[in-house]
Image (spheres, grey):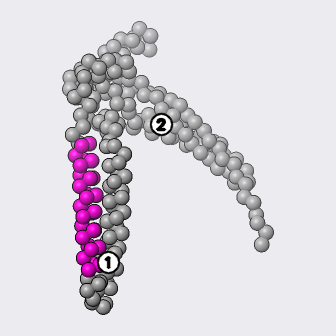
């Protein structure tokens, strides 16, 4: 058998763009705006250089990705008037638990899964040929499954609870206002600026 080399060319493209995002403040009802900037990437592949449009495909994919980002994404910018972060911005501001929590939960899930396999195996073994040895192994596997399963579930519940209680609006209001003013202006200020520019 003769090996046939496969040659392909990978094309990548990047598109950058920006859009003005309008945000109604949940706290003071001020509408403010900020500039959202994003970058989209696209990839196209041509095997044996047969796909002449691979470069165009990469560029088109980059533009589509960029368009999705500009339409659906946001930056967590507080209101420049009252410093209030909007509720939908909270997930981007929440940095989560220390890394040991998800790692511990993953280990607990893995041990619980192995215990479940052991419990099924020893349960089938006991049903086929009842013995005290199989019964003890079944009990131990079931106990480990219960303990580590409940532990993993409890850690997940704690993580969700902390995420739900997270509120960045409890931080210093003046600092939040300054951060908002560094990236955003009120809609009235933005429209006044547009009139000055003759747009």
Numbered disc in front, either 2 or 1: 1
Residue range in magenta is: 136-163
Earlier-in-chain disc, 2 versus 1:
2
Image spot of residue 52 (x, y percent): 70, 47
| Front residue of 190 and 95 | 95
In the rendered structure, the answer to whether residue 65 lies left or right of residue 75 reads right
In the rendered structure, the answer to whether residue 75 lies left or right of residue 86 reads right
Residue 40 visible: yes
Residue 112 placement: quadrant: bottom left
Circles 2 and 1, Cβ within 8 Å, touching? The answer is no
Q: Main secondary structure of the magenta part?
A: helix
| Front residue of 183 and 103 | 103
Which residue in the protein does label 1 denote?
Answer: 120
Which residue in the protein does label 2 denote?
Answer: 67
Q: Is residue 162 magenta?
A: yes
Image spot of residue 13 (x, y percent): 60, 38
Few, some or many C-alpha atoms within 10 Å of disc 2 (few <14, some 14-19, many ≥20)?
many
**Residue at far top of view:** 196
């Amino acid at each position: 058998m003769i090996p046939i080399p496969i040659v392909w060319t990978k094309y990548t493209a990047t598109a950058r763009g920006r859009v003005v995002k309008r945000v109604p403040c949940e706290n003071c009802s001020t509408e403010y705006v900020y500039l959202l900037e994003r970058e989209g990437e696209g990839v196209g592949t041509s095997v044996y250089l047969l796909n002449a449009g691979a470069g165009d495909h990469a560029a088109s994919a980059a533009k589509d990705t960029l368009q999705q980002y500009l339409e659906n994404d946001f930056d967590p910018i507080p209101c420049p008037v009252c410093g209030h972060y909007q509720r939908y911005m909270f997930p981007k501001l929440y940095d989560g638990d220390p890394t040991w929590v998800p790692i511990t939960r993953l280990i607990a899930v893995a041990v619980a899964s192995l215990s479940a396999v052991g419990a099924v195996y020893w349960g089938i073994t006991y049903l086929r040929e009842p013995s005290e040895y199989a019964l003890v192994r079944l009990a131990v596997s079931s106990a480990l499954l219960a303990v580590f399963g409940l532990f993993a579930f409890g850690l997940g519940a704690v993580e969700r609870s902390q995420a739900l209680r997270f509120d960045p609006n409890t931080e210093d209001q003046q600092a939040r206002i300054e951060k908002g003013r560094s990236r955003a202006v009120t809609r009235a200020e933005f429209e006044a600026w547009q009139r000055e520019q003759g747009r």
